[in-house]
Image (spheres, rainbow, N blue to C red):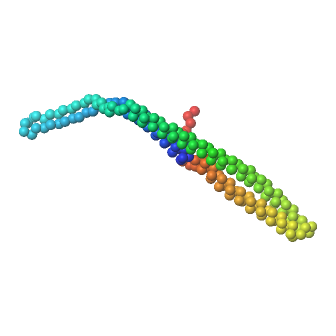
Amino acid sequence: ARRPDVREAERKLAADTARIGVTTAELYPKISLGGSGNFFRNAQVRGSDSFTFALGPLLSWSFPSVLAGRTRIDQAEATTRASLASFDGAVLTALKETEQALSTYAAETERNQRLREAVGHADVAYRLSDQRYRAGSTGLLDQLDAQRELIAARSALAASDQQLGSLRVDLFKALGGGWADLPPEAPRLN
């Protein structure tokens, strides 16, 4: 997952799941290996240096109340279920935001294409109006009106281009950010 909120929920779920195992392990004895070494030198008796070494297993077990241990395990499992619900919520939120961003971006892309067509039509209308004005068949007001329509269409297209850029950023954020930090692809062996 690239989104920080999803990664955070996943890590919390993993930690809470591991906590169940730790809590369960507390019910059982712990066995470890212990060792010690001693060196003793008696300065008064020459050659009486001694070295002792001890190695052996260590067993530690606090006899827990089984009921209290089971209660702690149940509590850890409940915490894990809550973390799972939080993770599911984070994933659903990420999917919802991504779907909304894709939908909005697609709608604006379609609108932008229509505005491009409108600019083309307004440009043709302006050229025809300009030719008619120069030929004397229409007045200046008709030519200025066609020019105003062309400028308005270009302005709407520029605003749509800016909106597409903003929506692209929103889409990248919904998907979890950019892809600049991806590791390079490993070479393929054929």
Residue at x 63%, y 45% (from the top left corner): 96
Which quadrant would residue 30 be assigned to in this image?
top left
Q: Position of residue 79 (x, y in %)?
A: 48, 39
Residue at x 42%, y 36% (from the top left corner): 72
Q: In this view of the protein, can residue 66 be seen by the observer?
A: yes
Q: Position of residue 184 (x, y in %)?
A: 54, 43
Residue at x 28%, y 29% (from the top left corner): 57
Residue 34 lies, with reference to residue 178, above or below; the image says above
Observer-nearest residue: 28 or 48? 28
Residue 26 lies, with reference to residue 124, above or below; the image says above
Q: Residue lying at the far front in this picture: please name it.
A: 67
Horizontally, residue 33 falls left or right of residue 139, namely left
Horizontally, residue 189 falls left or right of residue 35, namely right
Q: Position of residue 87 (x, y in %)?
A: 54, 41
Observer-nearest residue: 172 or 189? 172
Which quadrant would residue 144 be assigned to in this image?
bottom right
Q: Position of residue 166 (x, y in %)?
A: 65, 55
Observer-nearest residue: 117 or 87? 87
Position of the C terminus by quadrant = top right
